[in-house]
């Protein structure tokens, strides 16, 4: 049985909401949002719950943990951000309530409005379908280590809710609009930058029980770990908030298998351990699930290791009873 920790679904109302906010926005972020809106509007896999259930059956996925790559994180207007948050969460909550044996939810949070983010946690976090939150690589143009956001991390830690760090709008996006470079490389820069900032700024030092899921096999972080360590040794700003080397904090994170490269998978397993790797697909933005599964098979893991990755690690992290997943 597999639990897919990295999966998305959207409502048509949410897509229309994005169109109202970003449809006439000619900034790089607006242009990239328009590209995504077009994709989401024309691919039925983005919005079809019944089709999703069939796709899950096809690939032997018993449960998906649904989240929304949330463009509302870019919005400066509080009312618009609130509306987009509600529409994003409505869809994934409705799917999970209708099919509790097939779906769980990572709530979209408008982190740029911390009081609103905490209000949403207060409203929904006690629902059994809610197992965490999804935060984007930045919030309202501010980095994730902004002091104003610390109460949200404290609340997630208090509630025992992990967060998925998901890309949405990488720095330097104006250089990536051609050739779909945001999807191909930019998103990996975004999450790696955000995670490294959070570590060096001491957010995980301050909140030792706060858990993070680092998607796409940790972006560039595994490959750059030596350089991150060098920064810690060389620059006081990179060490003054930490009581241990940065790799200690990265080893606390969880990493999904969305990668499509067997040597990279082996590297992440050797660096972070089987117990910190989670099965993920990035459905519906990825259609290469068969090739992802082939890569996992090529690792020639033991049955126990494969069970850990396929479902047990995610179940333990998110508090999902394995008996509740089909």
Image: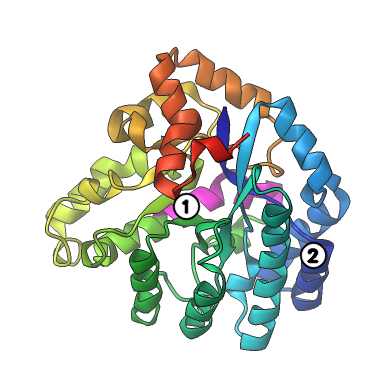
Residue at 19% of width from left, 48% of height from top? 230
Compared with 105, 144 (above or below) is below
Task: Locate residue 99, reporting x and y percent.
Answer: 71, 48
Point out which mark residue 15 bears.
2
Judged by depth in the image, the label closer to the viewer, 2 or 1, is 2
Q: Is mark 2 on a helix, strand or loop?
A: helix
Quadrant in the picture for residue 149:
bottom left
Which residues, given as a range, are shown in magenta? 178-192
Image quarter in which the C terminus is found: top right
Q: How crowded is mark 1: few (under 14 residues within 10 Å), some or many (20 or more)?
A: some
Residue 289 is at least partly visible in this image: yes
Q: What element carries label 1?
A: helix
The residue that disc 1 covers is 189
Image quarter in which the N terminus is found: top right
Task: Locate residue 273, reporting x and y percent.
Answer: 31, 31
Compared with 23, 55 (above or below) is above
């Amino acid at each position: 049985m597999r639990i897919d920790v990295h999966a998305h679904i959207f409502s048509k109302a949410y897509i229309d909401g994005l169109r109202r906010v970003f449809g006439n926005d000619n900034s790089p972020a607006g242009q990239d949002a328009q590209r995504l809106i077009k994709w989401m509007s024309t691919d039925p896999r983005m919005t079809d719950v019944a089709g999703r259930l069939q796709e899950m059956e096809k690939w032997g996925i018993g449960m998906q943990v649904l989240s929304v790559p949330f463009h509302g994180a870019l919005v400066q207007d509080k009312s618009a951000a609130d509306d987009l948050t509600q529409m994003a969460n409505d869809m994934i909550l409705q799917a999970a309530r209708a099919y509790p044996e097939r779906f769980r939810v990572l709530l979209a949070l408008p982190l740029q409005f911390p009081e609103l983010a905490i209000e949403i946690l207060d409203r929904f976090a006690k629902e059994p379908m809610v197992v965490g939150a999804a935060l984007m690589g930045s919030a309202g143009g501010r980095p994730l280590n902004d002091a104003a956001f610390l109460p949200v991390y404290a609340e997630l830690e208090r509630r025992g809710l992990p967060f998925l760090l998901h890309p949405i709008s990488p720095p330097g996006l104006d250089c990536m609009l051609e050739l779909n470079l945001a999807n191909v490389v930019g998103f990996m820069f975004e999450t790696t930058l955000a995670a490294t900032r959070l570590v060096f700024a001491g957010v995980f030092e301050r909140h030792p029980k706060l858990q993070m899921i680092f998607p796409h096999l940790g972006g560039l972080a595994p490959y750059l770990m030596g350089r991150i360590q060098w920064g810690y040794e060389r620059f006081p700003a990179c060490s003054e908030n930490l009581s241990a080397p940065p790799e200690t904090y990265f080893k606390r994170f969880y990493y999904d298998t969305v990668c499509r490269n067997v040597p990279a998978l082996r590297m992440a397993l050797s660096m972070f351990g089987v117990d910190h790797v989670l099965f993920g697909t990035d459905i519906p933005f990825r259609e290469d699930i068969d090739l992802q599964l082939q890569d996992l098979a090529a690792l020639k893991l033991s049955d126990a290791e494969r069970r850990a990755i396929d479902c047990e690690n995610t179940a333990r992290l998110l508090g999902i009873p394995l008996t509740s997943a089909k």
